[in-house]
Image: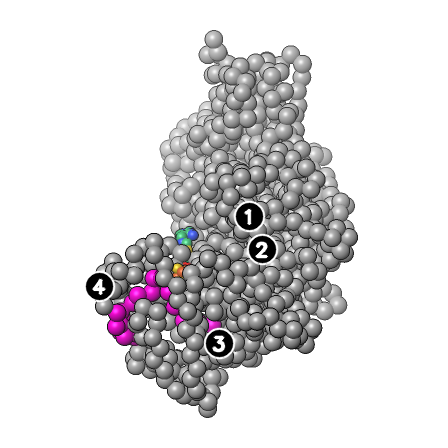
Amino acid sequence: MATTVDEAPASRKTNRIGLTQTDYKGKPSTLCKGCGHDSISSQLVKAFFEYGIEPHRVAKLSGIGCSSKTPAYFLNRSHGFNAVHGRMPSIATGCVLANRELIAVGVSGDGDTASIGIGQFVHLLRRNLPVVYIVENNGVYGLTKGQFSATADLGSKLKTGVSNDLPAIDLCGLAVELGATYVARSFAGDPKQVVALIQGAFGHSGTAVLDIISPCVTFNNHAGSTKSYTWGKDNEELIHEVDFIPHFEDIEVEYGEGEALSVELHDGSHIVLKKLERDYDPRNRRRAMELLAEAHEKQQFLTGLVYVDPKEKTFLDLLNLVDEPLATLSVERVRPPRSALEEIMETLA
Amino acid sequence: MSTETLVGESKSAVRPAIVNDFSIQVATVNGSGSQSSNNVLMRSIFQMGVPVSGKNLFPSNIQGLPTWFTIRASKSSYVARKREVDLLVAMNPQTAREDVASLGPGAAVVYEETLGLEKTRSDLVFYPVPFSDLAKEVIDEVRLRKLLANMIYVGVVGHLLSIDKDEIHAAVEKQFKSKAKAVELNVKAVEIGFAYAEKHLTKSDPLRVERMDATGGKILIDGNAAGALGSMFAGVTVVTWYPITPSSSLVEQLIDYLKAYRIDEKTGKATFAVVQAEDELAAIGMVLGAAWAGARSMTSTSGPGISLMAEFVGLGYYAEIPAVIWDIQRVGPSTGLPTRTAQGDVLSTYLLSHGDTKHILLFPSSAEECFEFGGTAFDLAERFQTPIFVMSDLDLGMNIWMSDPFSYPDKPLDRGKILDAAALEKAKKFARYRDIDGDGIPYRTLPGTRHPLAAYFTRGSGHTADAEYSERPDVYQENLDRLARKFETARRYVPGPVTDEADGNEVGIIAFGTSHWAVLESRDQLRAEHDVSTSYLRIRALPFNDELAGFVERHERIYVVEQNRDAQMLQLVRMELAENAALVARLRSVLHYDGLPIDARSVTDEILRQERSKG
Ligand SMILES: Cc1ncc(C[n+]2csc(CCOP(=O)(O)OP(=O)(O)O)c2C)c(N)n1
Ligand code: SF4
């Protein structure tokens, strides 16, 4: 069922570059109704619109998965690249090196990032490449029908009854530890926070990682340590017939800084979100690590901007690149003169 | 000195001098620093005007295992490996006995006196030298003595072969550039070797270097350096790599050249980006990302890396993204003989990835072609919007070849069919995958193009001509058919074969890459020694063009010479000619796959064997 991700009534309101929100829309989504990923797409549309970014300057990049399909569902007027599973970071790296004027926005899933792609993810963090990297984290492989991902909580169960015996990878912890310079966590159903964090990422020059909890309405029937499970077993079997995909409404939440909020997901399970305090200083890396560890112990998902370092050199600075895009340098600037070749030949004679 | 007669040879009659036509093998221990000595020895012969080639047969090891360097001097400019060794410099006690045992009768051996090799055979010429003692004369420092012992053998061999001492000195200076102290010590070592040989050794072998004039204006270079230069002068801007022998030196040398010649004078900033990636998957991903965004981007690897790139290369093929990938082929797998040469990636690379993929492959035979194809590869990649492979090998990439200096590429870069904002404005419409020109090649736009029509969404093969998502059977099939059409167009664009044919020849030879040099020499052997005159077609690229069928048609028996076990190129030739069974029946195979560079004698022997048994 095709729905357009942003169903707010078309507004004539224009942003600072004279575009309307509609100018930032994408193709109709083909994801399940109520999928958290669609909310994030809508929030991307809103963030780009409000920020007033020229769509042609954006490159939308992704790997493979339901989440990775979403770059088709926002910013029609930007180039997009749906690459291979887990390898979006390398595509993003090449893309930004070729044209440093592009605003690279990568969208990935937790399977895409935390399993097959973790090697590339880790090295992207290390390089502090200028890119906004969004993980639409649902704890499962949506597109291959519900297997565990490496961010699934310990003890959560698949609908087949199989339980997850391995600890979850905390992508924010990884990102802070390995060099990302803007690290945030949020919940797809909290549009205000998501939009604010995305816009913050636009203003950041290095790698910005946004780990956004994005419920999979079709396969996320977890019962686990961090989510309270309240759905009856009989019921579960009934509504999770493989070819029956129920329609759900988007979940929306609103809660204040420093507050904790328990949210009921579509399958009746709960997730506890805790928004960072207003006076939290995200520039302290060690504190950020501690905080993530504390939240983990309390079985809370800490939301907000966990860590930021606006001063660290980016990969482009390290490479000392010319200011113009490499892609379109004239031949005179990329082919050394005849005398250079003659000089080299001389040394080899 | 060079006119002395060959006295003192007790076992056989005086042999006529062999001038400028022999091979030297230096056996040392890996990590003992013999590379500069070998370079100096080779270069000094080169400076005497004598064509040379140098091949390093080294182990997968940093220190301690045996390694051999062979220098071939050839007045006829033969540069393939010569199977027989004429002069052995046995510096490795571990292998000395075996090395000596493998020599043909009459060969000469220079060796450390204390090894007592003269007792092992009576049909060789032995030159014992007290290298360790002599090294003490050069320097007190024990650590450097071993190194300098290597330079002493250069002096000994220089004297035995009548190489001009001044040329050795000049070669030392070239090798150590401006490092005065190193030059001084090494020259001293050479002198000591020279003096020792003059005083204590009686020339008893027939080998000699005499000045000739066949190297004037030539350069000495390895194929990887040539490929690096070709890439730089083709305007490469994004280079990614993951270290692997024998390809690392391509990028490492490229980095040096880029730093020297591609820093913007005004700003001091780089007009290039080089990234050592976390693995080959990332390396090719970065290349595709960069090329998608419009940069001339490349990576260099070897067989194991090519396997890792398979999935991405398939995406590159279907999504139509340029990429240049150098495959410096080696023996597989990583725990095989990773530092030995082969042409074993032909089939797997041609069809690399999933579904109906096939790729354009270039096969350079020489350093000059490495340079040239460095540019050709980018032009083809951007023209055809597809990954292009340059299929070099360890022999070409890491060994030292004599070459004409490279000529400056005057041709403008072919950036292919790119629509910028102005072109879009004129065209009024844009469909990323529509075949407007009937050649199968669509137009593309680059991200960042400021025009409402520019943007499109890139995904594998499930798309319409407008780049919209589609799983419709007819749409998919049309897309695949267009890709096949594009590949047909490529036949006319890729470098065609080089042929040397004469009327009436029954035997034709087909080869590619480094096999070329053995074939050249083998053809001379076949003609001179066996009165078999041959024609020759050297493949320079896949897909083939029409010349292949014509060549096969004009000859009775065609030998496809290659360095792999399964006759991979022959298989492709068979596929190409499959519709004509009579032609296919003419194809035969000459294979060489022991890890060493192919030599002419092996080719000659095998062709003769099959010629004799033809029935
Ligand atoms: C090399 C490779 N292996 C496996 C797959 C199959 N595959 C497609 S999507 C996917 C998982 C996606 O999960 P996730 O990234 O969490 O995204 P979601 O669908 O949950 O949004 C897998 C395993 C593939 N496309 N490529
Ligand atoms: S399967 Fe899950 S992740 Fe995929 S579209 Fe449906 S709800 Fe979203």
Q: Residue at x 56, y 74 (%)?
A: A47
Q: Which residue is mark 1?
A: B463
Residue A194 left/right relative to B377: left
Give the letter of the chain under mark 4.
Answer: A
Q: Residue furthest front?
A: A9
Name which quarter of the figure residue B454 lies in. Answer: bottom right
Residue A110 against residue B467 in the figure, above or below: below
| In the foreground, A190 or A8 | A8
Q: Residue at x 54, y 18 (%)?
A: B580
Q: Secondary structure at mark 4?
A: helix
Mark 3–mark 4 Cα distance, whole angstroms, equals 33 Å
Query: Which amino acid type is marked by label 4?
Result: Asp
Q: Which residue is mark 2?
A: B457
Are the residues flagged by discs 1 and 2 from a single subunit?
yes
Q: Residue B84 bears which disc, if any?
A: none
Residue B205 against residue A182 in the figure, above or below: above
Query: Which amino acid type is marked by label 1?
Result: His
Residue A267: horizontal and vertical position, in percent? 32, 68
Q: Residue at x 42, y 66 (%)?
A: A34
**Residues at discs 1 and 2 in contact (Cβ within 8 Å):** yes
Q: Which residue is mark 4?
A: A234
Residue B222 against residue B542 in the figure, above or below: below
Residues shaded magenta = A210-231
